[in-house]
Amino acid sequence: MSECTHDCSTCNADCGERKEKESFLKKPHELSNIKRVIGVMSGKGGVGKSMVTAMLAVIFARRGYKTAVMDADVTGPSIPKMFGIKERAKGGETGLYPVKSKTGIEVMSVNLLLEHESDPVVWRGPVIGGVVQQFWTDVIWNDVDYMFVDMPPGTGDVPLTVFQSVPVDGVIAVASPQELVSLIVEKAVKMANMMNIPMLGVVENMSYVECPDCKKKIYIYGEGATKKVCEKFSLPLLAQIPVVSDLAKQSDRGLIELFEGDYLENAATMIETLMKNLPEKKD
Ligand code: ADP
């Protein structure tokens, strides 16, 4: 054995000197039982991150899983509106309860705690990070097979706090083809690597529009950029979702649970398979 450098990060020997890496992970509420947590991230707002989060949650619920959405996009919370949830979240002696959607998906969002859902959230980063942590530690999530976390956009301070405090099992990046996809995916991959969280793949949203008459796909922002980036980082391109006016209408009217279309079915199957192959979590 070589001489001890006292730097455990460069050595994997199991000796008495080994110091465990400090973990910032928080324990969930003692009454919560959450099996898998998937983070959905994006480089910036408006690319459809919340839409993809909501659609994945709906697909997993349709497949019979107990599903939840944690809306960690605290300054731009859109999940309750997409699910048409008007009720406020209720708290008890022991903790805070998520609100159930029409099909039984458990949702927690800062919008469910504000007096008026149109109130702006004008908090600084550390406060926002603290709120998201509390969504994990103080909310009584029932039995949840899959929790989807709608992450704050970008790779800054707030998403970092979320990744540090919530034990995310895998992340998906959502990008639209008009963005600097390469840079965004690279940042997301690096962040996930730094946090030791597997990057499951990329969903390209608003990839194309389909001609209602001849069904031709028109790639307004060009074709192939996201695929190239995925190849560069050896990531699967999980899905390409077109611009669909029905999707926008359904999400605006709070009816996302009624969406049709199989844009994310393969992506959901891939996520399901990857998650099933992960070792069981220890409490
Ligand atoms: P983000 O969470 O990235 O900020 P959202 O999911 O809130 O973005 O989407 C932004 C807007 O774009 C919403 O009004 C949503 O309904 C709409 N939208 C997202 N994806 C699509 C799509 N594939 N087709 C049509 N409208 C979409």
Image: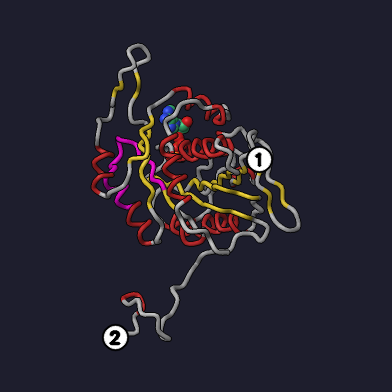
Q: Residues within 10 Å of mark 1 (few under 14, many from 20)?
A: some
Residue 100, numbered circle: 1
Task: Check the image and report above or below for 8 versus 128.
Answer: below
- Residue 202: image quadrant is top left
- Residue 69: image quadrant is top right
Cβ of mark 1 under 8 Å from ligand 1: the answer is no
- Please provide percent x and percent y for residue 229: 26, 44
Residue placed furthest toward the right: 93
- Please provide percent x and percent y for residue 85: 63, 36
18 relative position to 96: left or right: left
Ligand 1 lies in which image quarter?
Answer: top left
Q: Quadrant of the C terminus?
A: bottom right
Task: Check the image and report above or below for 13 versus 93.
Answer: below
Q: Amino acid at mark 2?
A: Met
- Please provide percent x and percent y for residue 152: 46, 48
Q: In the image, which residues are magenta?
A: 172-187
112 relative position to 75: left or right: right
In 3D space, how far apart are the residues under numbered discs 2 and 1 (Cα atoms)?
57 Å
* Image color mode: secondary structure
Residue placed furthest toward the top: 213
Q: Secondary structure at mark 2?
A: loop
Closer to us: 96 or 19? 19
Residue 1, numbered circle: 2
132 relative position to 140: left or right: left
Q: Residues within 10 Å of mark 2 (few under 14, many from 20)?
A: few
Residue 37, numbered circle: none
Q: Say if the magenta span includes residue 174.
A: yes
137 relative position to 59: left or right: right
